[in-house]
Structures are given as C-alpha cells and as structure tokens.
Amino acid sequence: MRKIINATYLTLDGDMSNMQDWHFDFFGDEATEAAHAQLFGSDALIMGRKTYDGFAPAWSSRAGADEFADRMNGIRKHVVSSTLKDPSWENTSVISGDVVAEVRKLKEEPGGDILQYGFGSVTRLLLENDLLDEFRVWLHPVLSGKATSEQLLYRDALQTRFTLNSTEVHSTGIIILSYLPVRPA
C-alpha cells in the first residue's frame, strides 16, 4: 500500500504561509538534497485547491528550468476540490465527492509514495480518517512575527498523537522532524 507523506515548512512561531520571507534564507545544499529525495521518492502529489492555485502557475512558469521543476510539473497531481472543474496544470486530476473513499483507492493503487505539501483542511481530513502515514515538519530557525491565525499550523481539531520517526539537522538550522501518527486502537 502506498504511503501519504505530508511535508510542512514551518517557523518557530508556527507560520507555514509566508515562506517567501524566511524559507530561502535557510535552504542550503542539505535542504536541496532532502527536498529532492522527498519529491523524487514520490510518484504523486495530493493537495487542496489553495495549494493548487499557488503551485500551478509557479511551477508551470519554471518548466524546463531544472530537474526539480520538471519533476514537479510532470508528476501525477490530485487536487481535492469541489470547485475546480478543468485543471490546466499537466497531469492533474480532481478529487471531489467522497474524498475519503477516493483517497483510499489512490493509496491502494500500485506505485510510490504520495506527497502533500503544507497543512490545511486536506491534511486534517487525512488525519481524521487514518489516511496520513507520515508528517514531516521542516522547522526553520526563525520567528516570522507576522502570520495571521489562518497562516499558523494550529487549528481546532481532534487531538492527534505522533511518534518520532527520525530527525535530520542541517547546518543552516533547519531540522526535519519526521513523525508517524499513532494509529487508533
């Protein structure tokens, strides 16, 4: 069975949305290697509409720029949305209707890991339905100081416990924390 892996880039104060202000200051060779391994270790992406709306134009505009951009553009993409009808980004399909059942079917298909960037309503749905297999927090050594409540990781949600799977410490101060959800009894 395929695994769904969430990768969330985060500041010390919980900002996950203003990456343009802090992420690239800490993205060195080690992070480049880790991001490459993460993307190339997957053969599909799953995302919500907001992530799609940000990723599609950004990555499409970088087509042919490098191996990472080409992988991002060429990989199969699944967008959870009730409003997106005709996605323009190549290799994109829309998941609507019974999202949980459709994601379960995706996990049962042959193939590699399914990667999800960011943490929002799709991630919470995956957690609530025991569909998320790994949660990777890319913790950056900076306080953003400007995130709104909607841009913070915290949300009212069901309590979810995790066990530490691994840590990776980079010379720039990024720490990648890999957690596995504790499965319900």
Image (spheres, helix red, strand yellow):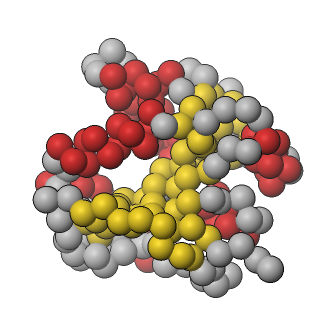
Residue 22 position, x and y percent, is: 20, 59
96 relative to 169, above or below: above
132 relative to 31, above or below: below
Between 125 and 170, the one lying in front of the other is: 170
Between 33 and 156, the one lying in front of the other is: 33
Residue 153 position, x and y percent, is: 46, 72
Residue 21 in view = no
**Quadrant in the rendering for residue 138:** bottom left
- Residue at x-position 52% and y-position 63%: 135
140 left or right of 28?
right
Query: Furthest residue to the front?
Result: 166
Residue 61 position, x and y percent, is: 35, 24
Q: Quadrant of the N terminus?
A: top right
- Residue at x-position 33% and y-position 22%: 67
**Quadrant in the rendering for residue 77:** top right
125 left or right of 32?
right
Q: Quadrant of the C terminus?
A: bottom right
131 relative to 27, above or below: below
Query: Furthest residue to the top?
Result: 64
- Residue at x-position 44% and y-position 77%: 149
- Residue at x-position 65% and y-position 37%: 78
